[in-house]
Image (spheres, grey):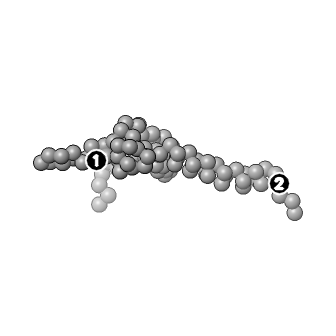
């Protein structure tokens, strides 16, 4: 029995699309989170950054040290695409 060309192309296209998306996310230094309500892309620190060397920031001195975020990821916006609306919260408690 011969496989129709459309289903064969779909069987090849899906893994190729996933591999391409993975490569683009890695090259652009993005982290992907997806569920049925949203697709969320957050920037990741670059390992080749000369300032933070991939750690994402550094600790400031003083009596109350704080983490200062590096510009290689902190100045890039997060992207969120809503897919389905979130369910409305119930007006009364469940119990």
Residue 24 vs residue 58: left or right?
right
> Can residue 40 be seen at all in this image of the molecule?
no
Q: Quick one: 77 or 68, which is closer to the camera?
A: 68
Q: Residue at x 61, y 51 (%)?
A: 18
Q: Which residue is mark 2?
A: 4
Residue 78: percent from left, percent from top? 42, 40
> Where residue 7 sits in the image (x, y, percent)?
77, 53
Give the class, few, some or many, for how many residues have Cα within 10 Å of label 2's Cα (few <14, many ≥20). Answer: few
SS assignment at label 1: strand
Which one is in front, 18 or 5? 18
Q: Residue at x 28, y 47 (%)?
A: 58
Quarter of the figure with residue 24: top right
Q: CA distance from mark 1 to mark 2?
A: 57 Å
| Residue 19 numbered tag | none
Residue 47 visible in the snapshot: yes
User: Which residue has dot 1 on it?
Assistant: 58
Most extreme residue toward the bottom is 1
Q: Secondary structure at mark 2?
A: loop
- At 87% across and 63% down in the image, what residue appears? 1
Near mark 1 (Cα within 10 A), the count class, few <14, some 14-19 or many ≥20, is: some
């Amino acid at each position: 029995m011969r496989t129709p060309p459309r289903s064969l192309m779909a069987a090849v296209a899906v893994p190729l699309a996933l591999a391409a998306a993975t490569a683009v996310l890695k090259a652009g230094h993005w982290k992907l989170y997806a569920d049925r309500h949203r697709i969320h892309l957050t920037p990741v620190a670059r390992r080749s950054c000369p300032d933070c060397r991939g750690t994402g920031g550094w600790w400031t001195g003083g009596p109350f040290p704080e983490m200062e975020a590096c510009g290689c990821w902190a100045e890039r916006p997060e992207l969120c695409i809503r897919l389905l609306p979130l369910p409305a919260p119930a007006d009364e408690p469940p119990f």
